[in-house]
Protein backbone atom coordinates (compact mmCIF):
# COMPACT_ATOMS: atom_id res chain seq x y z
CA UNK A 1 0.00 0.00 0.00
CA UNK A 2 1.11 3.57 -0.64
CA UNK A 3 1.40 5.84 2.40
CA UNK A 4 2.52 9.43 2.88
CA UNK A 5 5.58 10.15 4.99
CA UNK A 6 3.73 12.88 6.88
CA UNK A 7 1.11 10.35 7.97
CA UNK A 8 3.85 8.17 9.52
CA UNK A 9 5.59 10.91 11.49
CA UNK A 10 4.62 10.54 15.15
CA UNK A 11 4.15 6.77 15.03
CA UNK A 12 5.22 5.02 18.23
CA UNK A 13 8.11 2.58 17.95
CA UNK A 14 7.96 -0.37 20.30
CA UNK A 15 10.85 -2.66 21.21
CA UNK A 16 10.18 -6.21 22.38
CA UNK A 17 10.12 -4.97 25.98
CA UNK A 18 8.56 -1.51 25.76
CA UNK A 19 8.19 1.78 23.91
CA UNK A 20 11.35 3.51 22.73
CA UNK A 21 10.01 6.72 21.23
CA UNK A 22 8.32 8.46 18.31
CA UNK A 23 9.24 8.48 14.62
CA UNK A 24 10.35 11.99 13.60
CA UNK A 25 11.64 11.64 10.05
CA UNK A 26 13.11 9.21 7.54
CA UNK A 27 16.42 8.88 5.72
CA UNK A 28 16.39 7.65 2.13
CA UNK A 29 19.29 7.08 -0.23
CA UNK A 30 19.29 9.28 -3.30
CA UNK A 31 20.47 6.51 -5.63
CA UNK A 32 17.53 4.15 -5.30
CA UNK A 33 15.06 6.43 -3.47
CA UNK A 34 14.57 3.79 -0.78
CA UNK A 35 14.02 4.55 2.91
CA UNK A 36 17.00 3.19 4.84
CA UNK A 37 16.29 4.44 8.37
CA UNK A 38 13.49 5.66 10.57
CA UNK A 39 14.72 8.41 12.89
CA UNK A 40 13.27 7.86 16.36
CA UNK A 41 13.31 10.44 19.15
CA UNK A 42 13.57 8.55 22.43
CA UNK A 43 12.33 11.31 24.74
CA UNK A 44 12.90 10.93 28.49
CA UNK A 45 13.76 7.26 28.18
CA UNK A 46 17.16 7.94 26.59
CA UNK A 47 17.56 11.65 27.35
CA UNK A 48 16.06 12.72 24.06
CA UNK A 49 18.66 10.90 22.00
CA UNK A 50 17.68 10.15 18.41
CA UNK A 51 18.40 6.68 17.08
CA UNK A 52 18.37 5.21 13.58
CA UNK A 53 16.37 2.05 13.01
CA UNK A 54 16.45 0.17 9.72
CA UNK A 55 13.16 -1.05 8.22
CA UNK A 56 14.79 -4.49 8.46
CA UNK A 57 14.04 -4.38 12.20
CA UNK A 58 10.30 -3.85 11.69
CA UNK A 59 7.79 -6.53 12.51
CA UNK A 60 4.22 -6.24 11.23
CA UNK A 61 3.16 -2.59 11.68
CA UNK A 62 -0.01 -1.82 13.62
CA UNK A 63 -1.41 0.73 11.20
CA UNK A 64 -4.63 1.24 13.15
CA UNK A 65 -2.89 2.22 16.38
CA UNK A 66 0.07 3.85 14.62
CA UNK A 67 2.72 1.58 16.12
CA UNK A 68 5.90 0.21 14.56
CA UNK A 69 6.95 -2.89 16.56
CA UNK A 70 10.56 -3.98 16.08
CA UNK A 71 12.58 -7.10 16.87
CA UNK A 72 15.07 -5.33 19.17
CA UNK A 73 15.22 -4.85 22.94
CA UNK A 74 15.52 -1.49 24.65
CA UNK A 75 18.90 -2.54 26.00
CA UNK A 76 20.15 -3.31 22.49
CA UNK A 77 19.07 0.14 21.31
CA UNK A 78 20.48 1.86 24.39
CA UNK A 79 23.95 0.42 23.72
CA UNK A 80 23.89 1.10 19.97
CA UNK A 81 26.45 3.43 18.33
CA UNK A 82 25.59 7.01 19.28
CA UNK A 83 25.23 8.84 15.97
CA UNK A 84 24.59 12.57 15.81
CA UNK A 85 21.54 12.79 13.53
CA UNK A 86 21.98 16.56 13.31
CA UNK A 87 25.06 15.91 11.17
CA UNK A 88 25.35 13.97 7.88
CA UNK A 89 25.48 10.23 8.53
CA UNK A 90 28.70 8.94 7.01
CA UNK A 91 29.27 5.49 5.59
CA UNK A 92 31.64 4.82 8.48
CA UNK A 93 28.78 5.49 10.90
CA UNK A 94 26.64 3.05 8.96
CA UNK A 95 29.34 0.40 9.08
CA UNK A 96 29.40 0.73 12.87
CA UNK A 97 25.65 0.20 13.01
CA UNK A 98 25.67 -2.76 10.64
CA UNK A 99 28.41 -4.41 12.66
CA UNK A 100 26.34 -3.88 15.82
CA UNK A 101 22.87 -4.82 14.55
CA UNK A 102 21.98 -8.03 12.63
CA UNK A 103 21.15 -6.12 9.44
CA UNK A 104 22.17 -6.72 5.85
CA UNK A 105 24.06 -3.83 4.28
CA UNK A 106 22.21 -2.21 1.39
CA UNK A 107 25.25 -0.75 -0.37
CA UNK A 108 27.68 -2.61 -2.56
CA UNK A 109 26.82 -5.67 -4.62
CA UNK A 110 26.70 -9.41 -4.41
CA UNK A 111 25.37 -11.31 -1.42
CA UNK A 112 25.20 -8.32 0.90
CA UNK A 113 23.73 -5.72 -1.43
CA UNK A 114 20.31 -4.47 -0.63
CA UNK A 115 17.65 -6.85 0.63
CA UNK A 116 14.93 -5.41 2.87
CA UNK A 117 11.55 -6.36 4.21
CA UNK A 118 9.13 -6.09 7.10
CA UNK A 119 9.56 -9.55 8.60
CA UNK A 120 12.58 -8.66 10.70
CA UNK A 121 13.98 -12.15 10.13
CA UNK A 122 17.67 -12.21 9.26
CA UNK A 123 19.13 -15.47 8.03
CA UNK A 124 22.76 -14.37 7.58
CA UNK A 125 25.35 -15.08 10.22
CA UNK A 126 26.10 -11.77 11.94
CA UNK A 127 29.84 -12.31 12.33
CA UNK A 128 30.14 -13.19 8.65
CA UNK A 129 28.14 -10.07 7.85
CA UNK A 130 30.41 -7.85 9.91
CA UNK A 131 33.44 -9.17 8.08
CA UNK A 132 31.74 -8.75 4.72
CA UNK A 133 30.77 -5.16 5.52
CA UNK A 134 34.37 -4.34 6.42
CA UNK A 135 35.68 -6.00 3.27
CA UNK A 136 33.13 -4.22 1.06
CA UNK A 137 34.17 -0.86 2.43
CA UNK A 138 37.83 -0.44 1.65
CA UNK A 139 39.57 2.85 2.36
CA UNK A 140 38.93 3.97 -1.20
CA UNK A 141 35.19 3.33 -0.86
CA UNK A 142 34.97 5.23 2.41
CA UNK A 143 36.84 8.21 1.03
CA UNK A 144 34.81 8.42 -2.16
CA UNK A 145 31.40 7.78 -0.62
CA UNK A 146 31.62 9.34 2.82
CA UNK A 147 28.10 10.79 2.87
CA UNK A 148 26.58 7.46 1.74
CA UNK A 149 23.92 9.35 -0.24
CA UNK A 150 21.52 9.57 2.69
CA UNK A 151 18.94 12.36 2.60
CA UNK A 152 16.41 13.43 5.22
CA UNK A 153 12.76 13.61 4.17
CA UNK A 154 12.43 16.55 6.55
CA UNK A 155 15.28 18.46 4.90
CA UNK A 156 14.24 17.70 1.31
CA UNK A 157 10.66 18.83 2.00
CA UNK A 158 10.37 22.32 0.54
CA UNK A 159 12.81 21.75 -2.32
CA UNK A 160 11.89 23.65 -5.48
CA UNK A 161 10.68 21.57 -8.42
CA UNK A 162 11.60 22.91 -11.86
CA UNK A 163 10.22 21.68 -15.15
CA UNK A 164 12.21 22.03 -18.35
CA UNK A 165 10.72 25.48 -18.89
CA UNK A 166 10.21 26.89 -15.40
CA UNK A 167 9.43 26.38 -11.73
CA UNK A 168 6.30 24.39 -10.97
CA UNK A 169 6.17 24.08 -7.19
CA UNK A 170 7.73 22.71 -4.01
CA UNK A 171 7.98 19.27 -2.42
CA UNK A 172 5.31 18.95 0.25
CA UNK A 173 5.46 15.25 1.09
CA UNK A 174 6.61 11.82 -0.05
CA UNK A 175 4.58 8.72 -0.88
CA UNK A 176 6.22 5.39 -0.05
CA UNK A 177 5.38 1.77 -0.72
CA UNK A 178 5.00 0.23 2.74
CA UNK A 179 6.32 -3.15 1.55
CA UNK A 180 9.49 -2.18 -0.31
CA UNK A 181 9.96 1.18 1.48
CA UNK A 182 10.76 2.79 -1.83
CA UNK A 183 9.74 6.40 -2.44
CA UNK A 184 7.09 5.96 -5.11
CA UNK A 185 6.16 9.63 -5.56
CA UNK A 186 6.99 13.17 -4.55
CA UNK A 187 3.98 15.28 -3.59
CA UNK A 188 4.28 18.71 -5.21
CA UNK A 189 2.37 21.79 -4.09
CA UNK A 190 2.06 23.88 -7.25
CA UNK A 191 1.24 26.97 -5.18
CA UNK A 192 0.60 30.11 -7.20
CA UNK A 193 1.80 28.49 -10.43
CA UNK A 194 -1.36 26.37 -10.70
CA UNK A 195 -3.44 27.59 -7.72
CA UNK A 196 -4.96 24.97 -5.45
CA UNK A 197 -3.54 21.99 -7.30
CA UNK A 198 -1.29 19.27 -5.89
CA UNK A 199 0.30 16.63 -8.06
CA UNK A 200 2.54 13.64 -7.53
CA UNK A 201 5.54 12.81 -9.67
CA UNK A 202 7.71 9.73 -9.80
CA UNK A 203 11.43 10.01 -8.93
CA UNK A 204 11.94 8.50 -12.40
CA UNK A 205 10.99 11.87 -13.87
CA UNK A 206 13.95 13.54 -12.17
CA UNK A 207 16.60 14.79 -14.55
CA UNK A 208 18.94 16.37 -12.03
CA UNK A 209 19.14 17.38 -8.37
CA UNK A 210 21.02 20.44 -7.17
CA UNK A 211 21.54 19.66 -3.50
CA UNK A 212 23.42 22.90 -2.84
CA UNK A 213 20.52 25.06 -4.03
CA UNK A 214 17.67 22.73 -2.98
CA UNK A 215 16.36 22.34 -6.52
CA UNK A 216 15.07 19.32 -8.42
CA UNK A 217 14.77 19.41 -12.20
CA UNK A 218 12.30 17.07 -13.91
CA UNK A 219 12.25 16.31 -17.63
CA UNK A 220 8.67 17.37 -18.27
CA UNK A 221 7.17 20.74 -19.14
CA UNK A 222 5.02 23.12 -17.11
CA UNK A 223 2.11 22.16 -19.34
CA UNK A 224 2.68 18.47 -18.57
CA UNK A 225 2.41 19.16 -14.85
CA UNK A 226 -0.55 21.51 -15.26
CA UNK A 227 -2.57 18.84 -17.03
CA UNK A 228 -1.46 15.85 -14.97
CA UNK A 229 -3.93 13.93 -12.74
CA UNK A 230 -4.59 15.92 -9.56
CA UNK A 231 -3.63 14.46 -6.19
CA UNK A 232 -5.96 14.70 -3.20
CA UNK A 233 -4.00 14.57 0.10
CA UNK A 234 -5.52 12.24 2.64
CA UNK A 235 -7.06 9.97 0.03
CA UNK A 236 -5.63 6.53 -0.68
CA UNK A 237 -3.83 6.18 -4.00
CA UNK A 238 -5.98 3.73 -5.92
CA UNK A 239 -4.95 1.37 -8.69
CA UNK A 240 -7.08 3.37 -11.11
CA UNK A 241 -5.31 6.62 -10.14
CA UNK A 242 -1.90 5.02 -10.69
CA UNK A 243 -3.13 3.63 -14.01
CA UNK A 244 -4.11 7.18 -15.03
CA UNK A 245 -0.62 8.40 -14.12
CA UNK A 246 0.94 5.60 -16.12
CA UNK A 247 -1.20 6.39 -19.12
CA UNK A 248 -0.48 10.11 -18.80
CA UNK A 249 3.30 9.98 -18.44
CA UNK A 250 3.76 6.80 -20.47
CA UNK A 251 7.31 5.78 -21.24
CA UNK A 252 8.75 8.68 -19.24
CA UNK A 253 8.05 6.78 -16.04
CA UNK A 254 7.24 3.15 -16.79
Image (cartoon, rainbow, N blue to C red):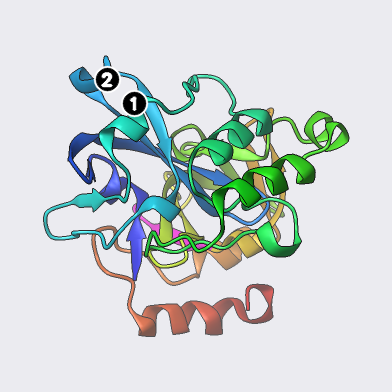
Tell which residue pokes out farthest to the left in this image: 65
CA neighbours of label 1 inside 10 A, class few (<14), some (14 to 19), many (20+):
some
Q: Is residue 95 above or below residue 46?
A: below
Q: What residue is disc 2 on?
A: 46
Q: Tell me the quarter of the image containing the C terminus.
A: bottom right
Q: Is residue 224 above or below residue 20?
A: below
Q: What residue is disc 1 on?
A: 78
Q: Give the main secondary structure, helix, strand or loop, of the magenta stretch.
A: strand
Check whether the beta carbons of the residues at disc 2 and disc 1 lie within 8 A of each other: yes
Tell which residue pokes out farthest to the right in this image: 140
Q: Residue at x 34, y 53 (%)?
A: 196
Q: Residue at x 50, y 23 (%)?
A: 83
Tell which residue pokes out farthest to the top in this image: 47
Q: Secondary structure at mark 1?
A: helix
Q: Secondary structure at mark 2?
A: helix
The image quadrant that residue 137 belongs to is top right
Residue 209 as seen in the image, left or right of residue 100: right
| Front disc: 2 or 1 | 1
Amino acid sequence: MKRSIKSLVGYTMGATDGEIGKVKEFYFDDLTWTVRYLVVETGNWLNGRKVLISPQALLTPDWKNEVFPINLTKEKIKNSPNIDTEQPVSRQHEIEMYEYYPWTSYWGGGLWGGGMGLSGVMIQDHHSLAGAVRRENSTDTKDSDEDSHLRSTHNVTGYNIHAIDGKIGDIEDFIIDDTSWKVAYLVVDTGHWFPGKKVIISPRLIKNIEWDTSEIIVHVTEEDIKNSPEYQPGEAISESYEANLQNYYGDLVY
